[in-house]
Amino acid sequence: MSTRRIKVRKSVRLCEIENQNIQQVTFSKRRNGVFKKANELVAMTGAEVGIIVCPQGSKPYSFGHPNVNEIINKYVGEKRSPSPSSPGIDDKYVQMFRKANSRELNTRLNSLQDQLDFALNLKSKLKQMNKKVESQQEWFKGPIEKMNYIEASMLKEGLEDLLLKVKNYGTEHGYGYENGKWKAE
């Protein structure tokens, strides 16, 4: 006679799990199990199922057929008809779901608002810097006679830079520059 081991399910004592890691793993496994059973119920009976699971300090998880929001609106929405099988579905959980969704949306909105504020602030700073640069470059538009020594020196350096750039451009494109005149090479 052979001895076979038969796997027997152990009874689990239902109490809160203290270890955070074990608690998270157990939550994930049991949540998936509940969602799987709900999916089987839908497949076998065609029932409308909506499940919302809200762990402490985390985002809510939901399963719904055809859709969690449709189920909530159908049974808890403004046009709901009283259900004899579930008089007063606990609005508290639906409100928690809606609050969690609105919290997540508010978090996203705040993040986007911060990014927008940063971008607008940066834009205004860049405009100010651009105005400063433009105002510093406006001095050469006036008559040369009214320039002081520093402004005249800056104008001379700018013109020499410009002439050098023009000469380089001409030589790169097949022109030579001699005695103030361009010659095709």
Image: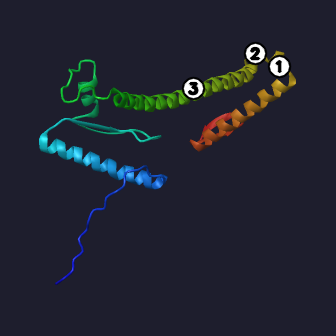
Secondary structure of the residue carrying numbered label 1: loop
Mark 2 vs 3: CB contact within 8 A: no
Residue 118, horizontal then vertical, whole percent: 59, 29
Label 1 is placed on what type of residue? Met
Observer able to see residue 185: no
Front residue of this view, candidates 75 and 132: 75
Front residue of this view, candidates 76 and 103: 76
Label 2 is placed on what type of residue? Gly
Q: Nearer the viewer, mark 2 or mark 3?
A: 3
Q: Is residue 28 above or below residue 49?
A: below
Screen quadrant of the N terminus: bottom left
Residue 28, horizontal then vertical, whole percent: 37, 50
Mark 2 vs 1: CB contact within 8 A: yes
Q: Earlier in the sequence, mark 3 or mark 1?
A: 3
To which residue does mark 1 refer? 147
Density class for disc 3 (Cα within 10 Å; few <14, some 14-19, many ≥20) is: few
